[in-house]
Image: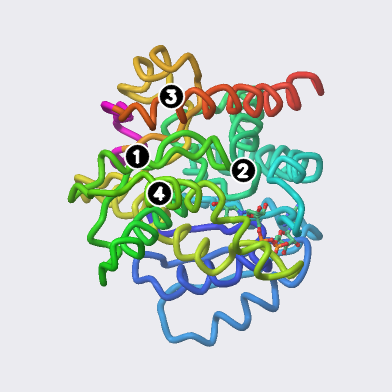
Amino acid sequence: MTKVAVLGASGQIGQPLSLLLKSSPLVTELRLYDVVHAIGVATDLNHIDTRAKVSGYLPADNGLEKTLTGAELVIIPAGIARKPGMTRDDLFKTNANVIADLLSGVAKFCPTAFVAIITNPVNSTVPIAVEVLKKAGVFNPRKIFGVTTLDVVRASTFVAHVLGEQDPQKFKVPVVGGHSGATILPLFSQSQPSVELSKEQLDAITYRVQFGGDEIVKSKAGAGSATTCMAYAGFRFAQAIIKASKGETGIVEPAYVYLPGVSGGEEVAKKLGIDYFAVPIEFGAEGATKAFDIGKLSAYEEDLLKTAVQELKGNISKGEDHVRVAT
Ligand code: NAI
């Protein structure tokens, strides 16, 4: 796979993410779409001496159709981001419509593409996307993902910081659940290598993974939310999909998926009583080949799981209802 489209490419995530994609030898064609500036961003990136050919499109002149036709991977950071005092759910009203519109385009112009959704609230925007694809009769649960990689990146980073370790990438910590506050469930009991944490340390880093986004929103004081770290995480996720599509095996990254549609996911969905959940996913040429179980949780994590599932259920039906009620 070589043709990648970024929708929302002029934004604070879209631009650094597009830069990373342009820098990658895995990408030969990069299409950028946004309601503003996408043509200029493309011109700028085209001065970089890598082989990916970049083109930019606006909504005029069938820009979305031109962006999506032939695209193999569509990454979506389009919409609005949080300001101080806002939760991800506060973004719903605007971003729900953005995602529904863009996914109608995907259904029409590149129905077999992989779709990676960054736009918040991910817990609800993914169910919206799924409902739109279902309505169009082109839903493939193995190819549509909510991007939760940033939570995984944060878990490695924060556990290394609290233990005074130099290399955060040494720690692989599964993060399951959703992508907002209490729905994010880092499983430090399953860290590899295993880690010894005091109750205070565990409380502190669990909270930091769950609410790390707020830390950035506050620190940027109105200028945006997580952007460069999200571009890094989004690129890591895109790489996983592209590498697997080219035949590389053994690639596992957590993602927020429609569990019953992925091999192994149905059992997890039944056990948890919920259809959408982020779990470690194994990728193959045709997308998600396996959803891994969440494994044995500590008593501490079991408690957090109950809250996460409860909150997620509301987020999921809000997304589904947005499309179902509109029909
Ligand atoms: P931003 O406001 O800088 O960029 C959003 C871009 O989307 C803008 O360029 C805007 O013109 C464009 N846009 C708006 N409506 C559009 C439409 N209908 N079609 C095409 N483009 C459209 O926001 P930023 O910081 O880049 O964040 C983007 C999204 O990513 C937000 O919803 C944010 O909450 C989410 N996010 C998700 C994370 C995750 O882990 N999944 C982490 C951080 C942010």
Q: Nearer the viewer, residue 187 or 244?
A: 187
Disc 3 residue crowd, few under 14, some 14–19, many 20+, Cα 10 Å: many
Q: Amino acid at mark 1?
A: Leu
Q: Earlier in the sequence, mark 3 or mark 4?
A: 4
Q: Is residue 319 above or below residue 234?
A: above
Of mark 1 and mark 4, the one earlier in the sequence is 1
**Residue 239, placed above or below residue 132:** below
Which circle, 3 or 4, is nearer the viewer? 4
**Separation of marks 4 and 2 at Cα, in angstroms:** 51 Å
Q: Residue at x 52, y 67 (%)?
A: 17
Residue 14 vertical position relative to residue 261 in the rendered view, above or below: below
Tell me the residue at 36%/22% (across/down): 265
Q: Which residues are magenta?
A: 282-296
Quick one: label 1 or label 2, which is nearer the N terminus? 2
Q: CA distance from mark 3 to mark 4?
A: 33 Å
- Residue 283 located within the stretch drawn in magenta: yes
Task: Answer left or right for 319 relative to 172.
Answer: right
Comparing 85 with 63, the one in front is 85
- Asked whether the beta carbons under mark 3 and mark 4 sit within 8 Å of each other, the answer is no
Q: Which of the labelled discs sits on residue 200, or is there none?
A: 4
In three-dimensional space, the C-alpha distance between marks 2 and 3, rounded to whole angstroms, equals 25 Å
Q: Quadrant of residue 51?
A: bottom left
Asked if residue 181 lies in the magenta stretch, the reply is no
Under circle 4, the secondary element is helix
Q: Earlier in the sequence, mark 1 or mark 3?
A: 1
Q: CA distance from mark 1 to mark 3?
A: 19 Å
